[in-house]
Image (cartoon, rainbow, N blue to C red):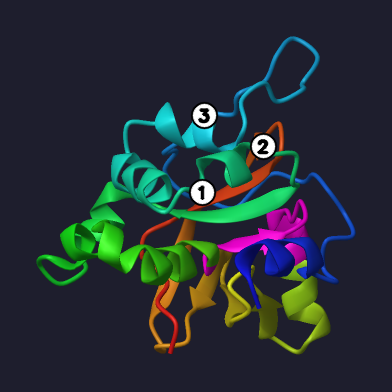
């Protein structure tokens, strides 16, 4: 299915409530709100301003996803930090951002995005409703598994790698960002 069609048809049942801030973690991003609590920056602008998501921003540009992730959404993005990307084997990022690997890069990046504005409270409620672990469909058409470890949301990718949300609920004008300490890879 073409990416645009997946983007239009992707849904997430858990995206029923918006709000609730929350989970413990060292701040990697600040909320970008105006005087009325309204987020001013979109997902891409927010990531560009953190100083810890330069690799992610470079990858989003290489995959031509800037316009999509700057669009109305709403989207929820699990945003790996530069340190998270650095944990990948040497040369992985350099290879992925090459034009010949654009499709693979797009699949990996959209594996970090879910449709809707999904807060940490939404994720936690979904996990609880499903007995401690819940599947989440991504815009790549693949699933992630979410669970709680204390107050921390832990996401397991298709390769079986667990990644923690280190900062949840960074609100943007077109969705929510959850900062992660790892990169998701499909199985």
Q: Tell me the CA gap for discs 1 and 2.
A: 19 Å
Label 2: state its secondary structure: strand
| Residue holding disc 2 | 171
The quadrant where residue 49 appears = top left
Q: Tell me the CA gap for discs 3 and 2.
A: 12 Å
The quadrant where residue 159 appears = bottom left
Question: Does residue 42 appear in the picture of this structure?
Answer: yes
| Residue 178 versus residue 15 in the image, above or below | above
Quarter of the C terminus within the rendering = bottom left
Q: Which mark is residue 65?
A: 1
Q: Earlier in the sequence, mark 3 or mark 2?
A: 3
Question: Which residue is at 29% across, 47% downward?
Answer: 55
Side of 112 where 139 appears, left or right: right
Q: Of residues 152 and 103, which is closer to you in this image?
A: 103
| Residue holding disc 3 | 45
Task: Tell which tag, 3 or 2, sits nearer the viewer.
Answer: 3
């Amino acid at each position: 299915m073409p990416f645009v069609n997946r983007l239009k048809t992707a849904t997430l049942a858990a995206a029923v409530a918006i709000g609730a801030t929350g989970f413990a973690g060292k701040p990697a991003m600040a909320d970008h709100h105006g005087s009325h609590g309204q987020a001013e920056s979109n997902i891409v602008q927010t990531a560009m301003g953190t100083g810890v998501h330069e690799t992610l921003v470079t990858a989003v540009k290489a995959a031509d996803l800037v316009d999509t992730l700057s669009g109305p959404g709403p989207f929820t993005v699990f945003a790996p930090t530069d340190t998270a990307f650095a944990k990948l084997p040497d040369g992985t990022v350099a290879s992925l951002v090459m034009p010949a690997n654009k499709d693979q890069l797009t699949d990996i990046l959209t594996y970090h995005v879910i449709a809707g504005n999904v807060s940490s409270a939404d994720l936690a409620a979904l996990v609880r409703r499903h007995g401690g672990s819940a599947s989440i469909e991504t815009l790549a058409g693949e699933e992630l598994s979410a669970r709680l470890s204390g107050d921390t949301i832990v996401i397991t990718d298709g390769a079986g790698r667990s990644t923690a949300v280190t900062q949840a609920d960074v609100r943007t004008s077109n969705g929510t960002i959850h900062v992660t300490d790892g990169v998701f890879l499909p199985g």
